[in-house]
Image: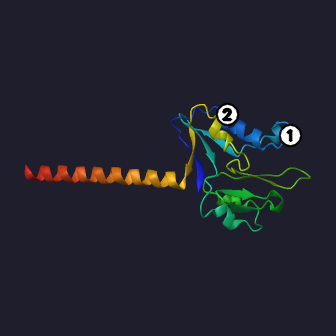
Amino acid sequence: MSFIVASPEKCIGCHTCEVACAVVHVGGVALTARHYFPRLRVIKLSNISAPVMCRQCENAPCVAVCPTGALYRKGEAIESVSHNCIDCKSCVVACPFGAIEIVSQPDLSPQIIKCDLCSGQQSGPACVSVCPTDALAIVTAAGLSLQQQKKQQKAAKCSRLSGLLLLEGSNHG
């Protein structure tokens, strides 16, 4: 399991990640407004910004609700087959992160727009490699497990310290 996480405290809202993503996925066509479909969106609030993208959920609700198999898990990522899409938008509604878009254009099959971790690109996700502030990072299952262990150790240490302070305080009362 791998996915990309954003650190809002590092993000400057420059949209470089969006542009890099759109360029990688344009498929040899000139990048124009008609073909500009980044697989992530930079969301800006009053004093913070951060890219929002697919988290490649282990038990992906988007895959579970897709009636045609247009979305499926392939290795680390949730992949899509746009020509199987019937434009029902069930996946859009099911995604807890708002990370899927269905684009419908006249005389074309609906296009599923979501992060695929730049599958097929040897250098990895374009958004991560171009971010000028290192606000994006790839998280793997091993990395997630390590982070969890560190948090548990820190919590245990704080708990022991709190217990000692309580004991010490009760002895002096």
Towards the viewer: 165 or 110:
165
User: In the displayed image of the protein, which residue is found farthest to the right?
Assistant: 107
Residue type marked 2: Thr
Q: Position of residue 8 (x, y in %)?
A: 53, 39
Residue 160 is left or right of residue 142, and the answer is: left
Residue 82 seen from this side: yes
- The image position of residue 39, as x and y in percent, is 70, 46
Whole-angstrom CA distance, mark 1 to mark 2, is 19 Å
Which of the two discs, 1 and 2, labels the residue nearer the N terminus?
2
Q: Which mark is residue 29?
A: 1
Q: Amino acid at mark 1?
A: Val
In this rendered view, identify the residue nearer to me: 128 or 91.
Answer: 128
Q: Is residue 101 left or right of residue 156?
A: right
Quadrant for the N terminus in the image: bottom right
Say what secondary structure mark 1 lies in: loop
The residue indicated by pointer 2 is: 16
